[in-house]
Amino acid sequence: MTRRRFAATVAIDWSGAKGKRHKGIAIAEARSDQAPRLVRPGHVWSRSEVLEWLIERAAAEPTLFGFDFSFAPPFVERGAYLPGEAGVPNEARAFWAYVDHHARDEDFGAASFLEQLHRKHFYFGIADGVKADFVHFRTCDRALNAQGGRKTASAYDAIGAAQVAKASFSGMRLLHQIDGQVAIWPFDPLPATGSAVVEIYTRIYIRNAGLPGKKIRTGDELDFALAALGSPPARLDHVPTDHQSDALITAAGMRAHLTHRLAFTPPGLTAKIARTEGWTFGIT
């Protein structure tokens, strides 16, 4: 797989926050060998706008889009997404539809799904008991941990700044809307032509740049990371937010990873995992 397969790689730093517009969303694209750039810098995105923009862009040119949320909860470890619950699907596509049907929050939010409908499966604080009892990981997360990638958050952890549950479940609602319009790897095989959507984890690319995984908060640090990923510098005219730097580095990192011979065929990815848990692009 070479970079020429896609006209651009796009990284979308996502948000599961309540509300209609989200300062935590940032989008960056990396084209050919150019410096990555922010898409609509300064714009406060809604999740609905991201969906509309992606569908239009995906049809216009072959683009690899990356979202930084878990595309499905862990399944292999316990044989179910929400053990003990009747009527919950056991494959990702049907589970996305299930989440979208039952979460009534505005702008593809999913807080009610976690806080009300399936509250007992999610950790919101010490009153819920021992946090370790809620922490379960997917196969790809365990593979990343084994490589020293420090995937520390679980899709069932819903408290604190590092939690990923709300972003992931709101993202699953978005995937349900995209499903059938753009290929979603690895739940769909990578098509020979056209656009595709993958899951990303920004820390992978910061680590690939030789940095310890901390947040990048200056233009100089950003350009250092980009150079390590084989990219020209961004040379921003402003101090980047965490979300912007994550998106810019990841867009460049995705582009670099396209040259890896195992980019879309990681050894640990089985047919069952591809149907249930998915895989993070960048873990091989």
Image (cartoon, rainbow, N blue to C red):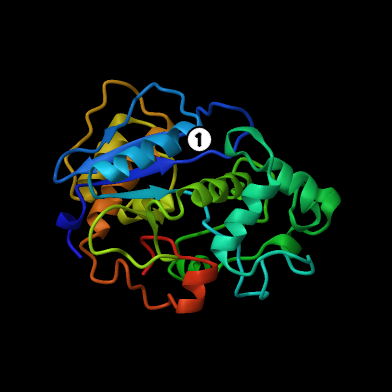
Circle 1 residue: 47
| Residue 34 point in image, percent of width and height | 15, 40
At a point 35% along the width and 52% down the height, the residue shown is: 205
Q: Residue at x 20, y 36 (%)?
A: 233
Quadrant (top left/top right/bottom left/bottom right) for the C terminus:
bottom left
Q: Is residue 209 left or right of residue 46?
A: left
Residue 234: image x %, image y %? 23, 33
Q: Residues within 10 Å of mark 1 (few under 14, many from 20)?
A: many
Q: Is residue 139 visible?
A: no
Q: 160 or 115, which is in the foreground?
A: 115
Quadrant of residue 42 within the rendered picture:
top left
Camera-nearest residue between 280 and 204? 280
Relative horizontal placement of residue 253, taking residue 203 as reference (left or right): left
Q: Position of residue 7 (x, y in %)?
A: 19, 47
Q: Nearer the viewer, residue 179 or 237?
A: 179
The residue sitting at 39% across, 51% down in the picture is 181
Question: Quick check: can you spot residue 260?
Answer: yes
Image x and y of residue 281, in percent:
38, 60
Residue at the spot 53% in from the left edge and 29% down from the top edge: 22
Which type of secondary structure does the marked residue at label 1 adopt?
helix
Q: Nearer the viewer, residue 260 or 72?
A: 72
The quarter of the picture where residue 135 lies is: bottom right
